[in-house]
Amino acid sequence: MSTPPGPSGGAGKLNGAVGKAFPHIDLDGHDLPPSPAPSSPRNGRKYALATELVYTESKDQYGASSMPIYQSATFKQSSAAGGGQEYDYTRSGNPTRTHLERHLAKIMNAARALVVGSGMGALDVITRILRPGDEVITGDDLYGGTNRLLTYMATNHGIIVHHVDTTNPERVKKVVSPKTAMVLLETPTNPLIKIVDIPTIAKLVHDINAKALVVVDNTMLSPMLSNPLDLGADIVYESGTKYLSGHHDIMAGVLAVNDPAIGDKMYFTINATGCGLAPNDAFLLMRGIKTLAIRMEKQQANAQRIAEFLEEKGFRVRYPGLKSHPQYDLHWSMARGAGAVLSFETGDVALSERIVEAARLWGISVSFGCVNSLISMPCQMSHASIDAKTRKERQMPEDIIRLCVGIEDVDDLIDDLSRALVQAGAVTVTLDGFHATGAPAALADVPIEESDAAAAPS
Ligand SMILES: Cc1ncc(COP(=O)(O)O)c(C=O)c1O
Ligand SMILES: N[C@@H](CCSC[C@H](N)C(=O)O)C(=O)O
């Protein structure tokens, strides 16, 4: 199979990183979608992001090229009075964690970054800023765990949560009030891959209530593709379990801010509750970050090919790298890439289940952002904590299949998906290609190349 051009040429071309002198032109000379100018350097950032990801100035006394793991709970003090050392106890601070936090602050364009034990742990730290009676505005296509934590806060801690369609800034505007303490945004949303206009919402929220905090979950893009602090967010958090670490071998959560007062509040919570990231996990996260650019580039190129393949076959595909995405321009005005998560519908839950279970190379797992490709049914897996009634109200299709694309050979991924579609009965293969076999709305009617047909079971 030949490689089709990506979104406006070169899927996953990281223009901010690749062509910093010419931010709208990638090195192959393709025009790229409009994107914001590279963010202004902060925290001593001198190079393009791909370089900064691997570039660190370790203060290690032996010049170790990789920051050592300070696997120590406590640190010797030089005097009974405490001695004023930087570290006394790992819950309060640890050199490996500090090294990672400084590195993250640099790549997230933040004055300060903090790391905790998971993405949900990061959101928990943020929600502890809230007081009973505070109002939170958030989306109606929200990660299941985020929905669960906000529901818990509403039930047990007197927080009022408004779920609105955040893809429409006017809907957000209608509910912002002096009681609004926080506006929590995800973009692209998961699993419906809807795009939220961060700059417009941040401005309208701050214009109405300057004290309201705009919080962005950047898990779906990572700092490689977006820096929401530069788009008007007050707090950015992400699950480091995903793209940042990239290998599904740790859980981690990352927080980033520019306002030192918010940073101090969050640090207080981390020390007080003991949720800071352990040194060994900090080491692994730091190691993962160094390959973020190259992983992301390959994952996006693969995702683009797969999204185009499924769309060509007649499925309804949601991916911001496709020109058919209704918010394509908005996405590219805020981000430097489309990411590697896409979803598609079959029109039939049982058919979707059969496709998922027929895949071999694609692992049936929750999570995303890893080097391995994953397939899942969000309504039954990652978003199962949102009850069926709420899912229906929020128009989440029960049959939706989510693909989280890894770094494997893309033709192997497409062959495996083709075979799963055939085996599941979504399509049948004849000598002249794929033919729909079931309910028309559920099926793709697609000619495929002979090599794909050969891969399908008879
Ligand atoms: C968008 C999003 N935010 C936050 C989280 C929470 O991250 P973690 O699993 O690391 O707690 C997840 C997934 O779990 C997610 O998909
Ligand atoms: N059983 C877990 C599900 C985690 S979902 C992980 C990830 N965010 C995804 O979207 O796949 C839970 O209940 O939290």
Image (cartoon, rainbow, N blue to C red):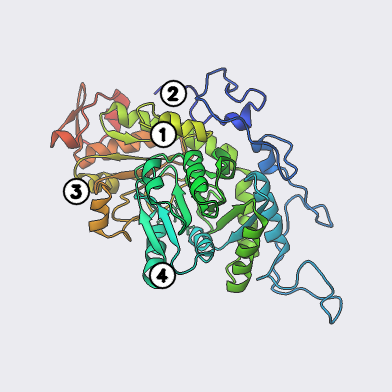
Q: Provide the residue designation for mark 3.
A: 350
Alpha carbon distance from label 2 to label 1: 18 Å
Secondary structure, mark 3, is: helix
354 vs 121, left or right, is left
Alpha carbon distance from label 4 to label 3: 40 Å
Kind of residue at disc 3: Ala
Q: Position of residue 172 (x, y in %)?
A: 40, 47
Dot 3 crowding, Cα within 10 Å, few <14, some 14–19, many 20+ = few
Secondary structure, mark 4, is: loop
Secondary structure, mark 1, is: loop
Q: Provide the residue designation for mark 4.
A: 158
Kind of residue at disc 2: Thr
Tell me: residue 303, above or below residue 1. Answer: below
Earlier residue among tags 2 and 1: 2
Q: Nearer the viewer, mark 2 or mark 1?
A: 1
Task: Name the image quarter holding residue 326.
Answer: top left
Alpha carbon distance from label 2 to label 4: 53 Å
Kind of residue at disc 1: Pro
3 vs 243, left or right, is left
Earlier residue among tags 2 and 4: 2
Q: Provide the residue designation for mark 1.
A: 320
Discs 2, 3 touching: Cβ within 8 Å: no
Q: Position of residue 223 (x, y in %)?
A: 57, 43
